[in-house]
Amino acid sequence: VAGVLGMLYLAISILLPNDLRRERSVIAKMVYGVTCFALIFSFTGTVLGGLWADDSWGRFWGWDPKENGALMIVLVNAILLHARWAGMIRDRGIAIIAVLGNMVTMWSWFAVNEMGVGLHAYAVTEGRMGVLCNVWALHLAFILAAWIPTRFWLGNRAVSEKSPD
């Protein structure tokens, strides 16, 4: 959800007039709030999964691809929140990292299944990697577009073209 909201924030920022600052700010706050919940739930799920693994398999962590994917989701969420709290990123940075977090989550949930390795190789879905790569390409396009300087964004051009200067 945070990644989709991040993509919405970037699309509005890049394509629509700059006078939608309040709406963009609301979307960035929504991304932040969703990420807070995502960190709590993903961390709790990872720890509970480790406790279950310790009880079932005799070890808490085995560096299985699914376990590593769960850890990557927790780390991306923590990076986003810490970077915001430290003032290293603002609304655009939050949106970019949220879209990146979406890519990490897709990797952890779906791409690992395509590898067919590890203890969690029970959900192999043949032939889905092409669709996943296309969705990643879309996400990457949003991230790359966000790195374009704001003076080249269509929304900023529309505002400057309207001014009588």
Image (cartoon, rainbow, N blue to C red):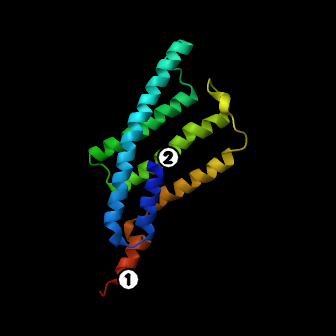
Name the spot of residue 69 as percent of width and height, x first. Answer: 52, 34
Which residue is under mark 2?
Answer: 102
Residue 147 seen anywhere in this rendered image of the structure: no
Q: Camera-side residue: 42 or 61?
A: 42
Q: Camera-side residue: 27 or 80?
A: 27
- Residue kind at label 2, given as amino acid type: Asn
Pair 2/1: label in front:
2
Q: Residue furthest top?
A: 58
- Residue kind at label 1, given as amino acid type: Glu
Q: Residue at x 53, y 54 (%)?
A: 139
Q: Residue at x 56, y 14 (%)?
A: 57
- Residue 161 circle label: 1
Name the spot of residue 28 as percent of width and height, x first. Answer: 36, 55
Q: Residue furthest bottom?
A: 164
**In the picture, residue 24 is in which quadrant?**
bottom left
Quarter occupied by the C terminus: bottom left
Name the spot of residue 77 as percent of width and height, x first. Answer: 40, 40
Q: Residue at x 32, y 51 (%)?
A: 89
Q: Are marks 2 and 1 in contact (CB under 8 Å)?
A: no
Residue 82 seen anywhere in this rendered image of the structure: yes
Q: Residue furthest right?
A: 126
Q: Residues within 10 Å of mark 2 (few under 14, many from 20)?
A: many
